[in-house]
Amino acid sequence: MNKKKNSPPGAIGDLDEAAARRRRVITLEQSVLEENDLVANQNRALFKSHGLYVINLISSPGAGKTSLLVETLRCLEGELRCAVIEGDQQTAHDAQRIAETGAPVVQINTCGGCHLNAAQVRKALEHLPLAALDLILIENVGNLVCPSSFDLGENEKTVLMSITEGEDKPVKYPLAFRLARLMVLTKIDLLPHLRFDLDLCRSYAYRTNPQIEILETSVFNENGLDSWIGALRKRVIR
Ligand SMILES: Nc1nc2c(ncn2[C@@H]2O[C@H](COP(=O)(O)OP(=O)(O)O)[C@@H](O)[C@H]2O)c(=O)[nH]1
Ligand SMILES: [Mg+2]
Ligand SMILES: [Zn+2]
């Protein structure tokens, strides 16, 4: 006899089943993250063996990651040897924009995946001249949530947030801001046209991560680009 059919909704049997299902989900998530950490550590060792500095850029879609990267590559041309790994669900649009600067670039299409993982990055690394590079910039899939949970083996995460997104993102999506060493507030040229309270946003960011370094940039009027480029120069091991 089917026990489940005879149980009233919400009976103990149903609760047990729900708890077991939850346990299975949690166990699976843990093993996915553990497996990812293993590969991330291999990536980290590879970066170290080549004296490479690697930054994982995280933001919501459209915050200005690719635009900042294009400007960064132009500024650092002839000074630091940079490459880019682009993560998007579909298209090679961003890789094409990067390729126009002349920098080596690999596009990863996650085909529905909402974050990059360490294994995807490891595969992308096979297409880059690691021995001839100083800095790799990884543009993660536009998403302020799960990219933060997946270590790629990078030296540090940078979180970007455009001032069109509202002041409260650092408290609404705290993990990205907690794990980042640097927060870049982009599109600062739009400030006169918005009702965006810079001090409030900074205070939310410091509440989430008291150590976070905050920069403001614009690729339209080049505001703050020198601070960003200076931060990169300081980090690269030469
Ligand atoms: N006003 C302004 N717009 C920007 C700036 N940076 C990027 N944008 C615009 O924001 C949109 C998304 O930029 P993109 O770099 O593709 O963002 P991504 O999705 O984070 O890579 C584009 O229309 C850019 O022109 C900026 O500093 N100021
Ligand atoms: Mg992009
Ligand atoms: Zn995801």
Image (tube, grey):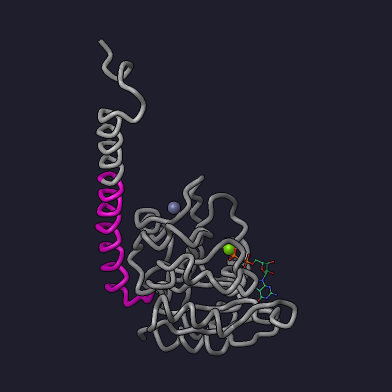
Q: State left or right for residue 222 relative to residue 150.
A: right
Residue 106 visible in image: no
18 or 117, which is in the foreground?
18
137 or 64, which is in the foreground?
64
Quarter of the image that includes the N terminus: top left
x 31%, y 16%: residue: 6
Give above or below for 6 relative to 226: above
Q: Residue furthest right?
A: 193
Give above or below for 137 relative to 1: below
Q: Position of residue 45 (x, y in %)?
A: 26, 68
x 36%, y 60%: residue: 149
Most common secondary structure along the magenta stretch: helix
- The span shown in magenta is 27-54
In terms of image quadrants, where is residue 7? top left
Q: Is residue 105 magenta?
A: no
x 64%, y 87%: residue: 223
Q: State left or right for residue 26 relative to residue 203.
A: left
In terms of image quadrants, where is residue 127? bottom left
Q: Position of residue 19 (x, y in %)?
A: 27, 38
103 or 92, which is in the foreground?
92
Give above or below for 145 relative to 209: above
Q: Position of residue 14 (x, y in %)?
A: 30, 29
Q: Position of residue 79 (x, y in %)?
A: 50, 86
x 75%, y 78%: residue: 193
Give above or below for 206 relative to 177: below
Quarter of the image that includes the C terminus: bottom left
Residue 221 visible in image: yes
